[in-house]
Amino acid sequence: MNTATPRVFIAATRQNDGKTTTSLGLIAALQRHFPRVGYIKPVGQRFVEIEEQKIDEDTVLMDRVYRLNCPLVDMSPIAVEPDFTRKYLQSSASDFLAKKITKAFDRVAWEKDFVLCEGSGHAGVGSVFDLSNAQVAKLLGAKVIIVSQGGIGKPIDEVSLNQALFQKEGVPVIGVILNKVLPDKIEFVTEFARRGLKRKGLELLGVVPHRTILSNPTVDSIRDELKAEILNSAGIHNLVEHVIIGAMSPQNAVSFFKPGMLVITPGDREDIIMAASSAGEHLTGIVLTGNLRPCEEVMAMIKKLPFPVLLVRENSYEVAFKVHNLIVKTRPADTEKIAVIRDIIAAHVDVNRILSAL
């Protein structure tokens, strides 16, 4: 396996701590030092099918944003399907999977100056099929950066747990990046988290402030989650900042309308739909529930609206619940979010310190 190309492994204390966001921003930062940066996510858990190949969603994101000039199947060698673990426990083909990863890494690293490796969840994820993040980092000969959510006590506790598993595998952890820290807490968290991590032999490599835009879903991501029918796709990439269930009179509903608002209402509440239409660009979209399609006159009006309208089978409560619990993932079309990610990682993560540690 290639041992010459510099590499780093991005891990996290848990899922959705900001590992992909960090990786996305770090690639841009690394490109200032290395003209050709490669990317690999050895083990992926959320995938899409492209040309009959199962490719991790984060791999698709990195490739479309950065045009990495490498086959997707090499950047995403293993996709954990629903029955993957059962099949593995029946066959225990650990050597086969390990070789698949190392061969994929060699192809990703070909003619590259640096390779960023992204893990999947905390250090122990994948242990059931002998490919935990700690084991994969060891397999790739990579040093590790751990990403954790902002704070002091809780993240240091969780980092210590993950550090122990990496140490067990003989994998060096070069430092920690704290993500989603409230802007007014940056200085406080930086000072005391650095002290706490230093006691564990770890460097604080960055403290990334929380940006609301990165936590807000787009209407398109909600459409995807709800498997919704699109009645009007204008502004489908609008950001959703607020949600309201239109279950009151239209006069009262209008008083709640404001920019960034997504209205959830039964499809037969044509009074609410008409009230929403008068709000114009002050709304970000409407979700019509209960699979209740409006009459032809209202449908004609919907097609002229400046924001998207979706139709779903679920009732309003079920839709609101799903939207509230939606895991927001950055998508290739989220150009505004991607620009923010590049800027905050460049401003708040010490790339020079990372490179010196490698």
Image (spheres, helix red, strand yellow):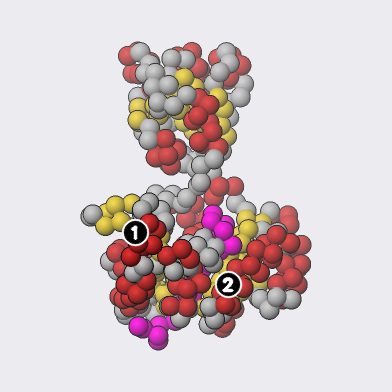
Kind of residue at badge 1: Lys
Residue in front for this viewpoint, 87 or 302: 87
Marks 2, 1: nearer the viewer: 1
Magenta residues, start to end = 1-19
Q: Nearer the viewer, residue 98 or 283?
A: 98
Q: Estimate the x, y position of residue 60 in percent, counting from the top left.
A: 36, 57
Residue drawn 51% across the image and 36% down it: 323
From mark 2 to mark 1, how far is it between C-alphas? Answer: 25 Å
Indicate yes or no whether the magenta region holds residue 13.
Answer: yes
**Furthest residue toward bottom:** 4
**Count of marks, rendered view:** 2
Mark 1 residue element:
helix
Assign a secondary structure to mark 2: helix
The amino acid pointed to by label 2 is Leu
Q: Which of the two discs, 2 and 1, labels the residue nearer the N terminus?
A: 1
Residue 76: x and y, percent?
Answer: 35, 64
Main secondary-structure element of the magenta-colored stretch:
loop
For image coordinates 39% across by 67% down, the residue present is 42
Q: Please tell me how crowded label 1 is: few (under 14), some (14-19), or many (20+) other residues with Cα within 10 Å.
A: few
**Mark 2 = which residue?**
165
Image quadrant assignment for residue 71:
bottom left
Q: Residues within 10 Å of mark 2 (few under 14, many from 20)?
A: some
Write the residue at 45% across / 81% down.
141
Disc on res. 87: 1
Residue 194 percent location from the top left of the image: 72, 71
Q: Position of residue 219 (x, y in %)?
A: 45, 37
> In which quadrant of the rendered image does the N terminus lie?
bottom left
Along the horizontal axis of the image, is 149 left or right of 139? right
